[in-house]
Image: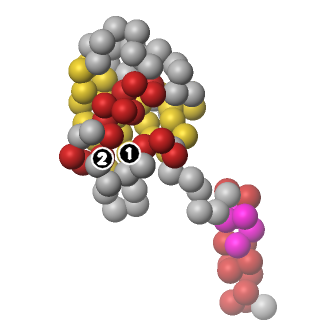
Amino acid sequence: MQVEVIYAEPDRVLRCQIDVPEDSTVGDCMSIAAAQSQFSALDCTGFATGIFGEQCGVDRVVQLNDRIELYRPLITDAKTARRLRAQQQRAPGQ
């Protein structure tokens, strides 16, 4: 069964198609992907994971053609980012 593993950074996207046995979990797929050359520099164990944008754990069983996504930790949470943008927009006109 084929699945895709994907990891995105601001300036590049890493992806690979892998073949896994039936009843494989997200964790199994991450282990296989970690052995691929494009993922070798990443510590795949530290990422939150999801399938097609829905967060899930590493014990979830994958289905044919699933896209497993590795999520980077946020640098700034959304609420803080909005507050900082609002402050920057108000500053020039004061």
Q: Which residues are magenta?
A: 80-84
Q: Secondary structure at mark 1?
A: strand
Identify the residue position indicated by label 1 in the image: 7
Q: How is the image coloured?
A: secondary structure
Q: Is residue 54 visible?
A: no
Identify the residue position indicated by label 2 in the image: 39
Q: Is residue 71 left or right of residue 63?
A: right
Q: Amino acid at mark 1?
A: Tyr
Q: Earlier in the sequence, mark 1 or mark 2?
A: 1
Residue 29 locus on image (x, y percent): 37, 27
Q: Quadrant of residue 64?
A: top left
Residue 48 vs 72, above or below: the answer is: above
Residue 67 locus on image (x, y percent): 37, 28
Residue 12 vs 52, above or below: the answer is: below
Residue 77 locus on image (x, y percent): 67, 58
Overall secondary structure of the magenta stretch? Answer: helix
